[in-house]
Every structure is written in C-alpha cells, then in structure tokens.
Amino acid sequence: MAGLLATEHNEIYGSLPGIEVPVGDALVSLSDMWNAPPSSEQSRSPSEFRASRMNFILHFGFEASVVDAQELFQSVIGFSKRYPCRILALCPSKDEDATGQGIVCRIFSECYIGDGHGDMSCCEALIFGYTLKEKQYLEDQISIFLESDLPTYYWPYRFDSPKKLSDYQSFFGNVDRVVVDTAAELYAVEELEVPKPEIIHDLAFARTLSLRQSIGQFFSAFPVDRILEGLTAIEVDTPDSLNAELRALMQWIQSVLEDCQNCVENSKRDWFEIVFEKSEEAEIRFVYENENAARCQLNLEAGVAHFDAAIGGSRHSISAVIHLLDSDEALAEALFSG
C-alpha cells in the first residue's frame, strides 16, 4: 500500500495518458515503443518519424486542477505537431504526507499523419509523479531524461507562490527559456527570484502579437518627437478577461516610448503615467497637455481595432484586423522570438 501512495494521492499524474513503467527503465521502454514494427496501414517504423528538436518541461503546481493539467498537456502535444519535442511533465502530489516508491513514471507517444504521402510527425512524453520528499533531488533526476545537445524549455504552471516556484533554481538556471502565463498565475513575473530573469517570457504578452503590429504600424505615420511631445498619461480601459494581455501590452508600449525618448534630442524627461480602469470594452487613450490626442479601440470579439489620432497637426485614422494568438502560436512566439 505504501508504494501506491505517491500515485494514488496524485490526481494530475493519474489523469494524464501513458503506460506506467519503472523510472529506471523509462528510456529503454520509450525506445522499445518507437522500435515497434509498423502496423498494417503503415509501411515505415514510427522511429523513422522520431525527430525531436527540443526538450519541453511542463511543471504543474499545486494550484493546477486536473482539467487544467489535461488541457495544458494536450496543448503542448498539439504544439509538438509543428515542433517535435520530448515532453517531460512533472506532477507533484498535493498530499504533504504522501510516501511511496519515489518518483513514478509513465511514457506516452503519439504520431500525426499529414496530407501528403509519408507526411507524419511524432512526439513523445515522459510523465513523472513525485512527492515533496523527492522535491530536493527532482531536478537532478529529471536531467537524466533530457535529450542532449537540444535546447530545453521550461513552463511552470499554477504555482501558489513565487517563492515556491523560485525554489527550482536548477530549472531556471539551466534551461534556454522559461515561459509563464500571467493570465493564469497569482504572481507577477518580477516577483520570481531567478538567476536569469531575462529568459522568462510571458504568454500573455506573446498573444498580443497582432495588436503590437497594428499599433506600431499606426503610430509609424507620425514623427517620434511629436508622439512624445506633451504626453502626460495613457489611460487603459481593461476588461477582466484581457487584464493580463493589456498589462503586458502596456509594458511594451512604455518600453518602446522610453527607447524613442532616448533617441530624441533635447527630449524632456518628464514622463507619463499609465492608468488602468476596469471596463467592458478595451480601449487605450493617449492623453496630452497640448492639442494632441490618440485613441485605440480594441474589439477582439469582432476581430477589429480602430485607431484615430491627431498628433503634431496631422490626423490619421485606420481600422485593422486583430486577434490574440491561439495556444500553439503563442507558445511558439514566446519560445522562439525576441
């Protein structure tokens, strides 16, 4: 009975697909799975389509529900259709008194048949269940299962505090990039105490790609110094459903304007404030002490943005198609851009 406690009290581990194998045999069992003979419909062995480009560590926190975990796991599996990878899913037991045989493991693989002849891609996953007693050596154990000479990415999801997540310093220190989703987390990225904060990328920000492109295109019609001149505030009407995305978007706008100010000679150092207000509609307004004015209405439900501005004596208005990136696109944007 004691050997089962680590899995019986680990609902997320139990809810994810795969074949349970001894941890020590996981890589051999995974290799055997790939080397299975082709089926009657398939003339080539699955191993011929096994071509991982990266390691992807998906780490669930205590705030993740079973439904969360299943949806996120399938999302990463979907991502692997375009970007084949070895997925390592880490599932902690929520029972602080759970004991058992140590880290437990399942292996999983899936192949996708494309439109063309022989067009198929495959992914693989190792799913680990562990108790808090194994936490201290979890990172060393998991490193054994990473494919060498490939980039490694880390997605921690729904940890209940930044301190508990910051405890996993080895993951933050040894991976190539970390993704978080501030729309789902209870902390701000800035609260994480990690050795390389510059490698952390926010999925909420990644989802705003088309908004950033449209805003940049619109304001490129005006001279930079005129956009900055007399700017006192940016007011942001924020629906609850877009709070994380709009805050990430505004951090980007602020950063861009600061860079612009540094490039403008004799630019005043007086700076603007950003004011967020709850609203049912998303809108960004640039407030000036002079006659300048600018407004961006963002209707994501309709998929359209309306921009209007009078800056430096010139008036310009456009409408643009906008959308938030879906989960696969946002993950690719967060991992591979910038």
Image: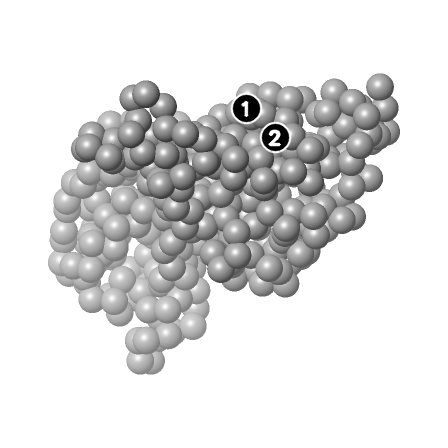
Amino acid type at circle 1 is Pro
Q: Quadrant of the N terminus?
A: top right
For residue 5, side relative to residue 239 (left or right): right
Give coordinates of residue 190: x percent, y percent.
59, 54
Query: SS of the residue at dot 1?
Result: loop
Name the residue nearer the viewer: 223 or 177.
177
Residue 1 is marked as: none
Query: Local crowd at mark 2 within 10 Å, few (<14), some, or many (≥20)?
Result: many
What scheme was used to colour the molecule? one colour
Q: Mark 1 vs mark 2: which is more N-terminal?
A: 1
Quarter of the rendering containing residue 305: top left
Residue 17 is marked as: 1
Residues under labels 1 and 2: Cα distance?
8 Å
Residue, x 31% and y 34% (percent of image)? 44
* Residue that protrudes farthest toward the bottom in the picture: 266
Residue, x 85% and y 24% (percent of image)? 2
Query: SS of the residue at dot 2?
Result: strand
For residue 50, side relative to residue 104 (left or right): left
Give coordinates of residue 284: x percent, y percent.
34, 44
Tell me if residue 233 can be seen: no
Residue 106 is marked as: 2
Position of 95 relative to 217 (above/below) = above
Q: In which quarter of the image is the C terminus?
A: bottom left
